[in-house]
Image (cartoon, helix red, strand yellow):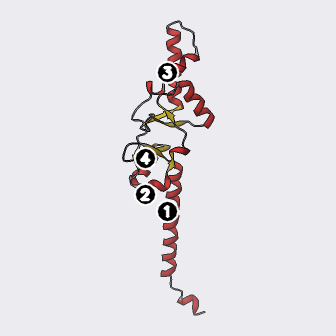
Amino acid sequence: MNIASFLIPRSMVTYLYDDCSVRQALEKMKYHGRKAVPVITRDNRYVGTLSDGDLLWYLTDYMKNSEKNKKSVDFRDLESVFVRDFLCKGKNPPVRIGTSYCELVERAIEQNFIPVIDDRDSFIGIVTRKSVIRRLSADLKQVQYEKLFDDLQETDYSAVNSK
């Protein structure tokens, strides 16, 4: 099975560039209502996923350091801090477009969305856990219907028809 049928293309995905500021990341994630987004380079290479928790921990550390250095907290300083400066690389690893359905299911267990890259390592979109679960549900229903149909074919109706 080709995972392209599950793919939400990059043009429809909320993502960040690794050179955007912390403020821009916060604004974009809030505006789109996202808890996590893929992060890519300007040449479309996937570099990781940024979550609201990552931003929260960064801001917590920023405020602690400001207090320790007796410096006032100024959120304008967040314009000069880029996502790539604190992004945890390796979190939420991507899959290739040719990845098997079984591998996709395994990844969906651990990840809310799975970033997808092509053969040139360019980010092309995501597959959501929701779409994988929907497909699993449809497959399960199909198996159940097939079993029911097989059971009906094996049933001996001669006793019913003789009455």
- Which quadrant holds residue 87? top left
Tag 2 residue: 2
Q: Nearer the viewer, residue 34 or 154?
A: 34
The secondary structure type at the circle numbered 4 is helix
User: In the rendering, at what x and y percent does residue 108 appear?
Assistant: 46, 47
Answer with mark 2 or mark 3, whichever residue precedes in sequence: 2
Single out the residue that lies furthest toward the left.
119
Between marks 1 and 3, how big is the CA–CA gap?
46 Å
Instruction: Give yes or no for contact between labels 2 and 1 (Cβ–Cβ under 8 Å).
Output: no
Tag 1 residue: 139
The secondary structure type at the circle numbered 2 is loop
Tag 3 residue: 81
**Is 160 displayed left or right of 118 in the figure?**
right
User: In the rendering, at what x and y percent does residue 40 appear?
Assistant: 45, 36
Foreground label between 2 and 4: 2
Tag 4 residue: 107
Answer with mark 1 or mark 4, whichever residue precedes in sequence: 4
The secondary structure type at the circle numbered 1 is helix
Q: Is residue 6 above or below residue 49?
A: below
**Is 100 displayed left or right of 65 in the figure?**
left
User: In the rendering, at what x and y percent does residue 139 appear?
Assistant: 49, 62
- Looking at the figure, which quarter contains the C terminus? bottom right
Foreground label between 4 and 3: 3
Q: Nearer the viewer, residue 56 or 151?
A: 56
